[in-house]
Image: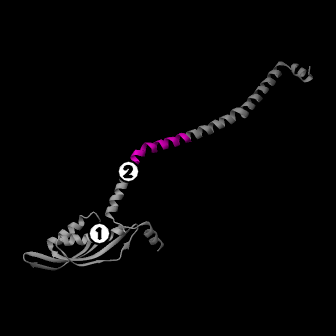
Amino acid sequence: MDPKIEKLLKLPKKQKIALLALILVAEGAALYFGLFLPRQTELKELRGRLEGVQNEVRDKQRIADNLPKLKNEYQQLQKDLDQALTELPNQKEIPTLLTSITSFGKGTGNDFLLFKPRAEVPKDFYAEVPVDISVSGSFHSVANFFTAVGNMPRIVNITDVSFADIKQTGGKTSVKVNCLATTFRFLDKKETQDDKKK
């Protein structure tokens, strides 16, 4: 038999137990640090990733649940944009709009003495289109003209109103009215970019 083993066998019982305990502790420590601890670290990391994925899934599910609502909101915003586009014409529609204003004036029995467009005033995403107007007619027909312009689907502001040459003829009051009609139009992307460059 090997002399080292014989030497171990001849040790007192307490030393054999202590040696066995030391071997078991060493093996336990080796198993703990070599196998168990790395697996625990890996498990914690995987649990963290799992929790992150679950949170992401919950967020995506919340978005998916809100999708019909968001689609409805998008459709409503699209309708609002279409409505805004009817109220604010583009460059091509301005002459037609100005012609409509003169048609309303003549249709209500007024005479146009002056219809003079001014230079546009560009703003952020729109431009003001001012027009000096001078009309004459009965007080009632001038009021009907302003009402007709106010009922247009486009936005037209009438400001700087002044009355002149008020006359009574045949039981009717005739008046000359000077005013500034301002409408607005959307600036397209190219115009907006050009304004920013200036």
Q: How dense is the environment of label 2, judged by Cα within 10 Å: few (below 14), some, or many (20 and up)?
A: few
Left or right: 7 as drawn, with respect to 65: right
Q: Considering depth in this image, is 1 or 104 the residue closer to the camera?
A: 104
Which residue does the image show at 35% across and 69% down from the upper left? 92
Which residue does the image show at 18% across and 72% down from the upper left? 142
Which residue does the image show at 19% across and 70% down from the upper left? 107
Q: Which residues are magenta?
A: 52-71
Please provide percent x and percent y for residue 43.
63, 36
Question: Is residue 72 shown above or below 121?
Answer: above
Q: Considering depth in this image, is 3 or 22 the residue closer to the camera?
A: 3
Q: Is residue 67 magenta?
A: yes
Q: Which residue is situated farthest in the left direction here?
A: 170
Please provide percent x and percent y for residue 171.
7, 75
Prevalent SS, magenta region: helix
SS class, disc 1? helix
Question: Is residue 1 shown above or below 157?
Answer: above
Q: Nearer the viewer, mark 1 or mark 2?
A: 1
Lower position in the chain sequence, tag 1 or tag 2:
2
Q: Is residue 79 magenta?
A: no
Residue at the spot of label 1: 97
Question: Is residue 175 shown above or below 32?
Answer: below
Q: Which residue is situated farthest in the bottom direction here?
A: 165
Image-quadrant location for residue 77: bottom left
Amino acid carrying mark 2 in the image: Glu
SS class, disc 2? helix
Q: What whole-number distance in Å separates the C-alpha atoms at marks 1 and 2?
A: 31 Å
Task: Return the mark for residue 73.
Answer: 2
Left or right: 67 as drawn, with respect to 12: left
